[in-house]
């Protein structure tokens, strides 16, 4: 095919007369345009690096300082206090541009002004960092802002008034503080006291006291010293490319399958339908994703700001695209590339490489639709071993690392694997259809299961994310967890869905707008040579993954009686309301309390990720026990609930402001391992199972549209597998004034858990708590 030849810059043939070269002008043109595009990106990075480096200053402010200094010298006013003359005396004389006195004066003024300008930038940056270290505003009651906080907010706004780029605030963000050992241990003991009997608590208290007095001081000194050198005490100070401790030990060193155990999923809009055409939906979505990537590369995305004032750390966004987790025998590594011009696509057991650009031009949505449709229409069968190849990424990490080294290190297998691992992201074209049907409760759960694990071989679980397209145009994501946390992929997803719905649009027949370019080269089929020995390992990995997937029970449901609008009438935060309801539901389900994990973020600090909120508190258990007993007056129950909610909100704020429990203990444990120090207290703390793991899905990080004007443009959030074999995983999204989505997971192999049963308990707990405050509810 002529199109295929255009993908090769030149061909040659060895003849008796010599070597005969045949050049392809079209391909050379593409290479030339790609080179131009690459240099443009480099120049943009240089420009952005300069603008980011001088924030909150700007080139304009430098010019103002120079003109002010120069103007004052012409008015015979020396605002430099003799420094300009001092600089002028040190300039070389008698040659070059310095021979003319005016030139020497201008250069001296420029040097002095640049120095003053840079000192001003450093002063304002340090002042902004000092201001951002203040977190007292988080602990003030809503509507009762102190005068000090108002002055603080005004100062922050003044220093950050110039339009920031994505990473402008990075150097102004404070470091994550190292909590004191005594405070961490006190909070830890408080978090477990109601979960242990007297004998167990006394034993744990003894271990904690011994640790605090003997072992902890030495470990804490190393940790504090580390915090002086590193930007975040969870990150090694040796090299910026080394994974932080949390990423390394919690994610990359895990040897169990990523599928279900680590990766999580994200759902599409569930109440609106843009098109039923699978290829068309992908055309718009992929175009929107690469547009987002371009904005990311150019730092044109606004940093997320809490209350529109406090900036959040953006460093996790750097590895959103062009990133793959590479398996290793002992530990994995994250491979991130500066750029990638293609995506890898899976359909009916075949892998394809789909180019995103024609020369330097990003393909239009209609062109991308045509390319995806070509893949859908391709009748070629899978090659031997190709259909279930991706099961290697769903099985054990050691097995995958060994197979990768043995069979994918050279030849066509290496070339094909490189095409996948070096892709911007992975796209899965599924042959089945999924969509939320309000009349069929099971539809949302089936949709979630398809996103969580699919067939165990139609997702590339190592990629930063897999974009999944079902036959009816419904989409979703399966996301690898090591490179970033859920709010980061949520930011991308909000942009993409908003762009798809309100900017790009579709024709009346459901296709992308515009006309396709039929001369584009079709997607390239990847070629494999997979021997039988490798196929046997692929089958083994598939069986491991299938057993894991079949064991997962997932129950997803939409709670309609009320949402955050009516919860606020209870004068509490929606998150605290749901977390206390989860405690009530769990006690009714299991007849006991358990250690509960809720993820909060620490992104108000530089390179911060998450912290744990231990949401099963003494106050929440007191409320739950009073509710279950059924003998208390409504006023007493309301008082107990408010105390539990206040405690939860305070713990959440402490976690967000660097005063959590678990990350500090985790780092002390890592330091103890480096030093060869044994700590029974730390070993026991870090081995405690989280039988209830919870997370709230962030939403409306980007104001792409007015949710009041388009109330049905709601995603259903996402979910994850259970952390403990005999526990529950619960993800929820408070999706508006009148809707909450829940994703509850457990394992069939546990006789103690049942996701649907627990989901029903959650429903009832929410209703029962609302009844305490006589909150009117919509019909279920």
Image (spheres, rainbow, N blue to C red):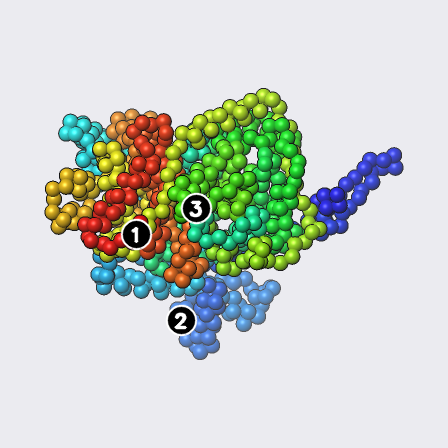
Number of marks present in the image shown: 3
The dot on residue 447 is: none
Mark 2 neighbour density, 10 Å: few (under 14) some (14–19) many (20 or more): few
Mark 2 or mark 3, earlier in chain? 2
Please name whichever residue, 38 or 75, is drawn nearer the observer in this view of the structure. Answer: 38
Residue 602 image point, x, y percent: 34, 47
Q: Single out the residue that lies furthest toward the bottom.
A: 75
Mark 1 neighbour density, 10 Å: few (under 14) some (14–19) many (20 or more): few
Q: Is residue 403 visible?
A: yes
Residue at 72%, 43% in the rendered image: 4
Tell me the CA gap for discs 3 and 1.
20 Å
Tell me the CA gap for discs 1 and 2.
73 Å
> From the viewer's perspective, is residue 633 above or below residue 396?
below
Q: Dot 3 lies on which element?
A: loop
Residue at 46%, 53% in the rendered image: 272
Residue at 58%, 31% in the rendered image: 387
Quadrant in the rendering for residue 627: top left
Quadrant in the rendering for residue 2: top right
Picture quarter with the N terminus:
top right
Q: Which residue is mark 3?
A: 436
The dot on residue 779 is: 1
Residue at 81%, 37% in the rendered image: 13
Quadrant in the rendering for residue 675: top left
Q: Which residue is mark 2?
A: 79
Taking the image as shown, residue 642 lies to the left or right of residue 381, namely left
Looking at the rendered image, the disc whose residue lies closer to the viewer, 1 or 2, is: 1
């Amino acid at each position: 095919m002529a199109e295929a030849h255009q993908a090769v810059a030149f061909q040659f043939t060895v003849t008796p007369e010599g070597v005969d070269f045949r050049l392809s002008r079209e391909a050379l043109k593409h290479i030339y345009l790609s080179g131009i595009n690459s240099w443009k990106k480099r120049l943009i990075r240089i420009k952005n690096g300069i603008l980011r480096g001088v924030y909150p200053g700007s080139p304009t402010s430098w010019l103002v300082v120079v003109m002010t200094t120069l103007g004052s010298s012409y008015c015979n006013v020396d605002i430099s206090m003799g420094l300009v003359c001092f600089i002028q005396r040190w300039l070389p004389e008698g040659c070059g541009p310095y021979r003319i006195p005016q030139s020497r004066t201008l250069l001296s003024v420029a040097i002095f002004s640049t120095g003053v300008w840079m000192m001003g930038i450093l002063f304002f940056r340090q002042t902004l960092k000092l201001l951002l270290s203040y977190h007292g505003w988080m602990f003030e009651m809503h509507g009762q802002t102190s005068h000090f906080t108002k002055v603080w907010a005004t100062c922050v706004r003044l220093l950050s008034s110039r339009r920031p780029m994505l990473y402008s605030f990075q150097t102004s963000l404070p470091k994550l503080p190292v909590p004191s050992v005594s405070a961490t241990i006190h909070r830890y003991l408080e978090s477990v006291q109601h979960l242990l009997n007297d004998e167990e608590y006394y034993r744990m208290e003894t271990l904690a006291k011994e640790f605090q007095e003997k072992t902890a001081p030495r470990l804490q000194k190393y940790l504090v010293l580390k915090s002086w050198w590193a930007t975040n005490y969870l990150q090694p100070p040796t090299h910026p490319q080394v994974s932080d401790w949390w990423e390394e030990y919690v994610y990359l060193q895990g040897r169990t399958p990523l599928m279900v155990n680590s990766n999580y999923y994200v759902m599409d809009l569930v109440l609106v339908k843009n098109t039923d055409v699978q290829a068309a939906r992908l055309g718009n979505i992929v175009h929107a994703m690469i547009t987002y990537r371009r904005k990311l590369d150019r730092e044109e995305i606004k940093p997320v700001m809490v209350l529109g004032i406090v900036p959040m750390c953006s460093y996790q966004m750097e590895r959103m695209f062009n990133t793959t987790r590479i398996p290793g025998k002992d530990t994995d590594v994250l491979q991130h590339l500066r750029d990638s011009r293609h995506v890898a696509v899976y359909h009916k057991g075949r892998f394809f490489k789909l180019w995103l650009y024609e020369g330097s031009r990003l393909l239009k949505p209609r062109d991308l639709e045509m390319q995806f449709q070509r893949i859908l229409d391709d009748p070629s069968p899978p090659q031997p071993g190709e259909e279930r190849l991706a099961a290697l990424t769903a099985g054990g990490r050691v097995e995958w690392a060994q197979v990768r080294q043995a069979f994918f290190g050279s030849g066509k297998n290496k070339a094909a694997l490189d095409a996948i691992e070096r892709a911007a992201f992975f796209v899965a074209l599924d042959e089945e259809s999924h969509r939320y049907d309000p009349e069929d409760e099971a539809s949302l759960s089936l949709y979630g299961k398809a996103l969580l694990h699919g067939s165990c071989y139609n997702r590339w679980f190592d990629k930063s994310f897999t974009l999944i397209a079902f036959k009816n145009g419904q989409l979703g994501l399966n996301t690898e967890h090591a490179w970033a946390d859920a709010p980061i992929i949520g930011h991308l997803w909000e942009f993409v869905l908003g762009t798809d719905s309100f900017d790009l649009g579709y024709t009346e027949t459901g296709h992308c707008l515009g006309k396709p370019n039929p001369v584009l080269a079709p997607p390239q089929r990847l070629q494999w040579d997979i021997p039988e020995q490798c196929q046997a390992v692929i089958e083994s990995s598939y069986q491991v993954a299938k057993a894991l997937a079949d064991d997962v029970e997932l129950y997803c449901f939409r709670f309609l009686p009320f949402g955050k609008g009516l919860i606020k009438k209870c004068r509490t935060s929606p998150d605290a309301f749901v977390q206390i309801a989860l405690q009530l539901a769990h006690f009714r389900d299991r007849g006991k309390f358990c250690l509960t994990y809720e993820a909060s973020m620490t992104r108000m600090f530089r390179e911060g990720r998450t912290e744990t909120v231990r949401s099963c508190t003494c106050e929440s258990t007191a409320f739950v026990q009073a509710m279950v007993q059924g003998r208390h007056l409504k006023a007493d129950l309301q008082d107990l609930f408010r105390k539990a909610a206040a405690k939860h909100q305070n713990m959440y704020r402490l976690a967000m402001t660097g005063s959590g429990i678990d990350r500090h203990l985790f780092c002390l444990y890592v330091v103890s391992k480096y030093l060869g120090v044994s700590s029974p207290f730390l070993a026991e703390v870090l081995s405690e199972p989280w039988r209830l793991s919870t997370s709230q899905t962030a939403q409306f990080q980007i104001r792409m549209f007015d949710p009041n004007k388009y109330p049905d443009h709601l995603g259903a959030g996402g979910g994850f597998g259970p952390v403990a074999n005999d526990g529950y995983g619960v993800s929820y999204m408070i999706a508006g004034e009148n809707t909450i989505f829940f994703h509850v997971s457990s394992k069939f192999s546990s006789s103690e858990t049942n996701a649907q049963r627990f989901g029903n308990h959650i429903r009832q707990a929410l209703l029962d708590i609302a009844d305490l405050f006589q909150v009117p509810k919509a019909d279920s």
